[in-house]
Image (spheres, coloured by chain):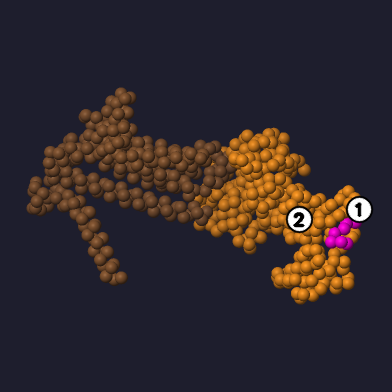
Chain colours: A brown, B orange
Amino acid sequence: MKKNSKLSGFYLGLIFFLMYLPIAVVVVFSFNQSKLPVAFTGFSLEWYDKLFHNSAMMEALVNSLILGVLSCAISAVIGTLGAVGLSRIHWKSKGILEYISILPLMIPEIILGMVLMAFFYMLGLPFGMLTLLIGHTVFCVPYILMEVKARLVGMDPSLEEAARDLGASPFRAFWDITLPLIMPAVVSGSLLAFAMSMDDVVISIFVNGPRLSTLPIKVYTQLKTGVTPEINALCTIMLGVTILVLILYSLVGKHKGGKNEQTDRA
Amino acid sequence: MNKLIELKNLTKNFDDQQVLRGINLDIYENEFLTLLGPSGCGKTTTLRIIAGFEEPSDGQVLFNGIEISKLPPYKREVNTVFQKYALFPHLNVADNIGFGLNLKKVDKSVIAQKVERMLKMVGLEGFEKRDVTLLSGGQQQRVAIARALVNEPKVLLLDEPLGALDAKIRKQMQVELKKIQQEVGITFIYVTHDQEEALSMSDTVVVMNNGEIQQIGSPTDIYNEPENRFVAGFIGESNIIEGVMIKDYLVEFDGFQFECVDKGFEDMEEIEVVLRPEDLDIVDPEQAKITGIVRNITFKGVHYEILVETDLRTYMIHTTDYAEAGREVGLKFGPEDIHVMCKMGAY
């Protein structure tokens, strides 16, 4: 038994080592003085400096942030309303409807990208921020919808009835009671969706248009012309942001868990 | 007393299932009325129709003579205390109670005053800032009652409000609820499946089964003069015996004729007789018409429960006397202990 657990510990370590070695290499070499990623010649922030003075990169970053925040906000509204709507219908076809609503997660990205491109072309929409926004919203909505739906399942339906009983119109009952109670799920779903939007390449490439570039696309196209330590620096920053978002997500999740327990006792 | 709510021929279907089959009921001002019945009898559905959460499939709900069955809940002058209290977990005690007044844009200082008065009435003075999720079941229940009553409704609806509480607190709350009802002087419509609760608190008990009203009456009427086998069986324990009403004040069952206090049946009508276990006495065999053998005796605290087997059936008796198993005994009861009721279909 003891030997077995030692072996599994070693195996686990090996897996993590192999998984995170490339990432560690990228992070380490982003602080390297030398341009060549073969030997660590000394600590330097030169590549970060270069990165921040690379106007094309910064423009891509701004585009990505705008896109991430906007698609997140729109998805939060659509996803929340969708989840609340789904929770109130009792049709036989409800199960199918729920599957359809999270389908964008299951369709291969490359197909979704192609389909969106064809669709926008058909509509004659100019490719750019608008098409990117629609594209990202399509795959962001399911994340929020699923989170909110799970939260609503644990909510006592008589809470909203109590609000209406006390004189609240259906809208006020939703606004004053349901929304504050599902807010943690809306926030955590949005953070997840934001993280997904920030690193999407496949769908973005199909719908971004000729002039507009997001950060992941920029990184991807730079790779074709060779890796510079600048990219390492950029990857390190993006990694940092992603980890931050994940930490926030888990904190919100924890808070949500605590609240859930209390609701059950109520 | 004035009629406040009238239910007229109310029916309700869920999908193919008929849960209410023509409910006719008048509810008066200042009345403590209980809808009593087993689960699935339609009592909660009736309450939800009065609250406005369900629309009847057919029939009318009149409030002060005005049809309201299409009116949404937030426009009705009734408030509800829910089974699991349904307190808003993200609001504190004061904000929970003030929720309804806040919606009506009542002045903040007035709200604070009314909340304080309500808390005092339900015995939770100083609880304003408490987190509702950290209160005990009984305290949450009091907050729920205060939250409903602060809106000064004409009718308070209570859906098995004591169901989740333990026996001791339940007894205490029964007394308090009755006191509160008399204090505020409004109509309470109370739903429960607990017959003891219904009998001890109500002015009027409405016994329901299978989507229909079985009997409407005062607790004593319901207990002493059950109209049919279902009511007799549901309210308390009883021995129900088929028999024949020979003529007024004379009934025959188990092969003997007995004097009774009932009249108004047709001569020789087939009826059923209720004998409450506590109305039967164990005597020597020669002192009684009905005799049998003691089959079982169980100590129940205040009394013994004795099962006596006769040639035709087994009688249940509640008595403080002891009679060992196997002894032959007689069963004695007076004319006023015999309750005659109409015969109905099998239950």
Local crowd size for mark 2, using a 10 Å CA cut-off: few (<14), some (14–19), many (≥20): many
Q: Check disc 1 and report its element: helix, strand or loop.
A: strand
Magenta stretch holds residue B81: no
Q: Is residue A19 left or right of residue B119?
A: left
Q: Is residue B252 left or right of residue A183?
A: right
Residue B153, numbered circle: none
Q: Tell me the distance, in whole angstroms, between the alpha carbons under discs 1 and 2.
A: 22 Å
Give me the chain letter of mark 1.
Answer: B
Q: Is residue A241 left or right of residue B189?
A: left
Give me the chain letter of mark 2.
Answer: B
Kindly identify the amino acid type of the residue bearing the numbered disc 2.
Ala
Kindly identify the amino acid type of the residue bearing the numbered disc 1.
Lys
Q: Specify start and end residues of the magenta stretch as a single range.
A: B248-256
For label 1, the residue is B247
Residue farthest along the top direction in this orientation: A124
The percent coordinates of residue B246 (x first, y second) are 90, 54
For label 2, the residue is B232
Q: Residue at x 81, y 66 (%)?
A: B311
